Amino acid sequence: MEAAHTLAELTVTSPEQMRDLGRRLAKLLRAGDLVLLSGELGAGKTTLTRGLGEGLGVRGAVTSPTFVIARVHPSLGDGPPLVHVDAYRLSGGLDEMEDLDLDVSLPESVVVVEWGEGKVEELTEDRLHVSIHRAVGDTTDEVRHVRVLGLGARWAGAELGALSA
Ligand SMILES: Nc1ncnc2c1ncn2[C@@H]1O[C@H](COP(=O)(O)OP(=O)(O)O)[C@@H](O)[C@H]1O
Ligand SMILES: [Mg+2]
């Protein structure tokens, strides 16, 4: 039985804040970490990843790839590269992403997978699940609730207070 640890629940009210959250989250990540992002289209998964890339100090702009499933952003310094996967178009699991060799790159990378739930869990027991929800009845359409859940020994007792602005 895997223990789930609810690490943080936050509200962000703008794309800039989502990006900031990504920057703060980056400070907690190291090579070997797998982050799954869930939330409907337009929730802000790529926006969060953009901040993550900035926080990690990697090369290249994080975008929503139309045809590319995964993009590797090498570190500009001596940190780990960011592997950004958008699994939206994939219905199968890891076997369908075989070419990406995520199992090979994970130990030395931070791997972030949009729409990864139910597809990449077998990579590792230690995972961070970030789910983003639009606030119901929000008038400005920019309010998002973000829940960060840690799984596995890596995140047991992790201090995530740093995620709050
Ligand atoms: N609080 C917010 N956080 C993130 N994105 C927001 C927020 N409010 C509005 N947006 C907008 O919603 C869209 C999110 O797009 P994106 O990050 O590509 O979502 P996803 O990757 O989940 O499909 C962007 O156009 C962004 O400007
Ligand atoms: Mg996206």
Image: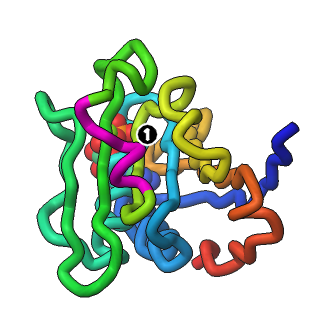
Please name the predominant secondary structure of the magenta segment in the image. helix
Location of mark 1 (residue): 43
Compare residues 154 and 10 and report the one nearer the observer: 154
Q: Is residue 94 above or below residue 37?
A: above
Q: Residue at x 28, y 85 (%)?
A: 78
**Percent x, y of residue 69:** 22, 33
Q: Nearer the viewer, residue 86 or 80?
A: 80
Tell me where residue 77 sits by quadrant. Answer: bottom left
Pick out the residue farthest to the front.
Answer: 104
**Residue located at (51% from left, 51% from top):** 35
Span of residues in magenta: 99-106
**Quick one: quadrant of the C terminus?**
bottom right
Q: Quadrant of ligand 2?
A: top left
Q: Is mark 1 within 8 Å of ligand 1?
A: yes
Specify whether 165 is left or right of 55: right
Across and down, in percent, residue 20 comes to 42, 72
- Number of numbered markers: 1
Q: Is residue 132 visible?
A: yes
Q: Residue at x 74, y 71 (%)?
A: 158
Residue toward you, 37 or 146: 37
- The answer to whether residue 44 of the structure is visible from this angle is no
Residue type at numbered disc 1? Ala
Above or below residue 136? Residue 154 is below
The reply, left or right, for residue 71 in relation to residue 137 is left
Q: Secondary structure at mark 1?
A: loop
- Where, by quadrant of the figure, is residue 74 drawn? bottom left
